[in-house]
Image (cartoon, rainbow, N blue to C red):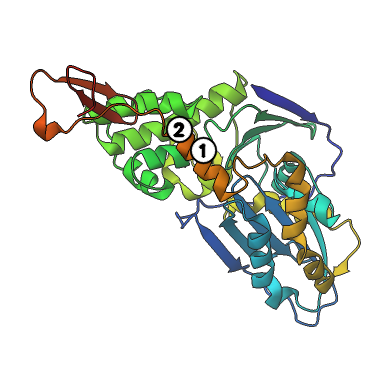
Amino acid sequence: MTEIIAIAPALPEPPQVANPLPVPAPQAATSAATPGPSSDPAGSEEPLCLGVDIGSTTVKLVVLNSRNEVLFDFYERHKFKIAEIFQKALEEAMPILRGRFVTIAFTGSAGMNVSEVLKLPFVQEVVSCTTAVRTFLPPVDVTIELGGEDAKIVYFDKTGGVEARMNTICAAGTGAFIDQMASLLETDPLGLNDMASHYQTLYPIASRCGVFAKADVQPLLAEGVSKADIAASILQSVVNQTISGLACGHPIRGHIALLGGPLHFLAELRASFQRTLKLTPEEMIVPPQSHGLVARGAALHGRTGAPMPVEFLVGRLRTLSTALREAAAPAVTPPLFTSPEDVAAFRERHSRTRAARADIATASGPCFLGIDSGSTTTKLALIDQEGRIL
């Protein structure tokens, strides 16, 4: 199901960048923390702006000065250790932040919980994205953003309004889907991208569900189809899911900005979008560090808040991990076992019923072989005339 969000043109039009931005070269997608291209005078009194985008799989942090120049950016998968990775990001930014006043705002699907615990501003990610696109990019007609578990298409009209369309049911056609399919090919997303660069033929692969996609991929592997062709077909299925599942017939034309981690790191995924949408190089806009663009939008919104000493923010973070666990406590499922005795009793109870077995070395007479070849595994069982497993 696609959720459609219409946003009125309430935000003022910021200054636009004159020239299209180049396509970035592939980079490692696990962790990145880099100082920005600009430096800030050590004795400057102006507050610095922090934007934090915490999604379903990654933490992004950027530091902007009053001229909207990026002084620092950070990107890393959090693997559900959100507090630890956020603290790591802030520690790496401290050479720039130490002794300064800062403003901050959070965005992203997991950023809301963090902002509530820390009692700091939160901005909805579509709003952050829209603000960043209008501020940092050339004029665009549509943005396509793929995240860890969500996908968005935002249409910009000539009157300043926007219409956003988001996936609302599952992570089909997102970074998580690509991770799952890469694992099936015994590689990672960057390895999948490298494989896809050598493809010859595209095959239809379902992208509405990882299970259905596996059901399409497994027969191709069994038939000896090259992994390069399968990898490219997987990326093409992501494109098909985005266009059919989110656009729903609404034309995607004009100048298109490709945003988010998967589109930043995977050149072959960008090429699939370009090929399918028939985009010229001038029509396809891929900003440098596009995976942190939404965090930059959050930083711009956070600028309206009251500045605080960065040491005050660091002090709040010391209790973040505990506070997040306490906030999630009501939703935690009770453990199945509360003591070693419970585990022992469970094992003893279930060990009473076992399939009869016999030694294959002493077996004689007819034996019967059963083979179960599924989408991901093959199981074999050999039994004798009395039904005993050999």
Q: Nearer the viewer, residue 301 or 381?
A: 381
Residue at which label 1 appears: 346
Q: Is residue 195 left or right of residue 314?
A: left
Task: Classify 10 Å Cα crowding around label 1: few (below 14), some (14-19), many (20 and above).
Answer: few
Instruction: Say above or below: 139 vs 381.
Output: below
Q: Position of residue 73 (x, y in %)?
A: 63, 63
The N terminus, quarter of image: top right
Which residue, given by chain and number where applicable, does mark 2 sit on? 350
Q: Residue 218: x percent and y percent?
A: 32, 28
On screen, residue 125 versus residue 34, left or right, reads right
Quadrant location of residue 185?
top left
Residue lying at the far right of the rendered structure: 306
Please determine whether, in this image, residue 127 is positioned above or below residue 350: below
Q: Is residue 280 visible?
A: no
Q: Position of residue 334 (x, y in %)?
A: 67, 41
In this orientation, which residue lies closer to the viewer: 370 or 269?
370
**On residue 38, which mark appears?**
none
> Given the image, on which type of amino acid does mark 1 rest?
Phe
Mark 2 residue type = His
Relative image position of residue 327 (x, y in whole percent): 78, 48
**Mark 2 surroundings: few (<14), some (14-19) or many (≥20) residues within 10 A:** few
| Distance of label 1 from label 2 (alpha carbons) | 6 Å
- Kindly state the secondary structure of the residue where label 2 is placed: helix
Q: Are marks 1 and 2 in contact (CB under 8 Å)?
A: yes
| Nearer the observer, 234 or 86 | 86
Q: Residue at x 34, y 44 (%)?
A: 186
- In the rendered view, does 325 fall on the left or right side of 179? right
Would you identify the image quadrant in which residue 236 lies?
top left
**Residue at 84% over, 42% down:** 11
Q: Is residue 105 left or right of residue 263?
A: right
